[in-house]
Image: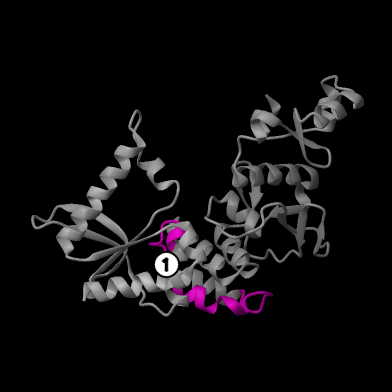
């Protein structure tokens, strides 16, 4: 019950429930209990059912339990707790900002940042003390690549934590902080209409490849004015539509009792209809495409030629 409620239990809690040193060591050794940080455990059945983000949340709770009011969650840990999209970030360590004047350092599975809280008063999300989402997003972008930075900046706008002007003001107020110099392009590109990391990465790829920037979330209506679909990207003046197909997309579209093949077929019909209505070609990208930019560029240019 403790593990299901808090996500973890401590060695001290186990001892209070009657487990001795040898029993604790044995359960951890045979894998019944997962020791994910010193003195902190989770039942294997629960831990193995969690994805990386959920495990990071458990780590966050454990770190806050250990360090108490001396710290607040920040950077990528704060972004995860605020349910922002993060990509390409190491989630094996928890990021905190010190509130007690202690110096920044990496200590085991915790990255300690020097406290500069000021007007960014901590908030409580799901029982955890964390810096506001906007600051966490900018700080996360600062310690990541430009591509990863665009993902989290798009996400903080998409989830309504700030508008574009507020994001720019926050960036200006933090512009002298370490890591901010490489964010000028992602800051200019940030757009809350990108709904997930895959769509943001697509926009970054188009920019890197010097391909034209698309319109986002373009609504397609039929001749009677009925909305038939919304495309992630569109280059209507060039006769092209585009979509990102993540591995979870069809799972979200799947209704109870529906065969996955039916969903794929319905999506293919939807694409055919949108192409018929608009007269445009369609480019679809998947995660693997982002690791082969030359192939994407060749496909894009070939489709542009066929559209013309």
Which of these two is toward me, 122 or 111?
A: 111
Which of these two is toward me, 307 or 67?
A: 307
Q: Is residue 121 visible?
A: no
Position of 51 compared to 33: left or right?
left
Name the spot of residue 67 as percent of width and height, x first: 79, 48
User: From the viewer's perspective, is residue 198 above or below residue 249?
Assistant: below
Position of 191 compared to 112: left or right?
left
Q: Quadrant of residue 300?
A: bottom left
Residues rendered magenta in the picture: 174-199
Give the quarter of the figure containing the N terminus: top right
- Going 70% across and 44% down the picture, which residue do you hit? 59
Which residue occupies the extreme top position in the image?
18
Q: According to the image, label 1 marks what residue?
A: 191
Which of these two is toward me, 120 or 9?
A: 9
Q: Is residue 194 magenta?
A: yes
- Going 12% across and 56% down the picture, which residue do you hit? 225
- Going 21% across and 54% down the picture, which residue do you hit? 272
């Amino acid at each position: 019950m403790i593990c299901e409620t808090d996500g973890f239990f401590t060695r001290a809690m186990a001892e209070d429930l009657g487990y001795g040193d040898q029993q604790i060591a044995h359960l951890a050794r045979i894998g019944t209990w997962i020791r994910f940080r010193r003195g902190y455990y989770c039942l294997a059945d629960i831990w193995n059912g969690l994805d990386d983000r959920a495990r990071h949340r458990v780590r966050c709770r454990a770190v806050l339990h250990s360090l108490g009011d001396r710290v607040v969650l920040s950077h990528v840990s704060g972004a995860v707790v605020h349910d922002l999209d993060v990509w390409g970030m190491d989630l094996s360590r928890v990021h905190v900002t010190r509130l007690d004047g202690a110096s920044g350092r990496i200590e085991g599975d915790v990255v300690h940042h020097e406290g500069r809280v000021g007007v960014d008063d901590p908030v409580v999300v799901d029982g955890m003390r964390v810096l506001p989402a906007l600051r966490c997003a900018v700080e996360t972008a600062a310690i990541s690549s430009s591509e990863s930075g665009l993902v989290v900046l798009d996400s903080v706008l998409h989830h309504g934590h700030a508008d574009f002007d507020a994001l720019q003001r926050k960036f200006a107020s933090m512009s002298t902080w370490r890591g901010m110099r490489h964010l000028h392009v992602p800051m200019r590109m940030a757009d809350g209409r990108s709904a997930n990391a895959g769509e943001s990465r697509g926009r970054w790829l188009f920019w890197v490849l010097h391909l034209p920037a698309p319109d986002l979330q373009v609504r397609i209506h039929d001749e009677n004015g009925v909305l038939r679909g919304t495309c992630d990207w569109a280059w209507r003046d060039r006769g092209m539509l585009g979509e990102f197909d993540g591995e979870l997309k069809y799972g979200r579209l799947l209704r109870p009792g529906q065969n996955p093949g039916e969903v794929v077929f319905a999506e293919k019909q939807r694409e055919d209809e949108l192409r018929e209505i608009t007269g445009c070609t369609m480019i679809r990208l998947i995660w693997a495409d982002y690791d082969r930019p030359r192939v994407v560029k060749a496909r894009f240019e070939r489709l542009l030629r066929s559209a013309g």
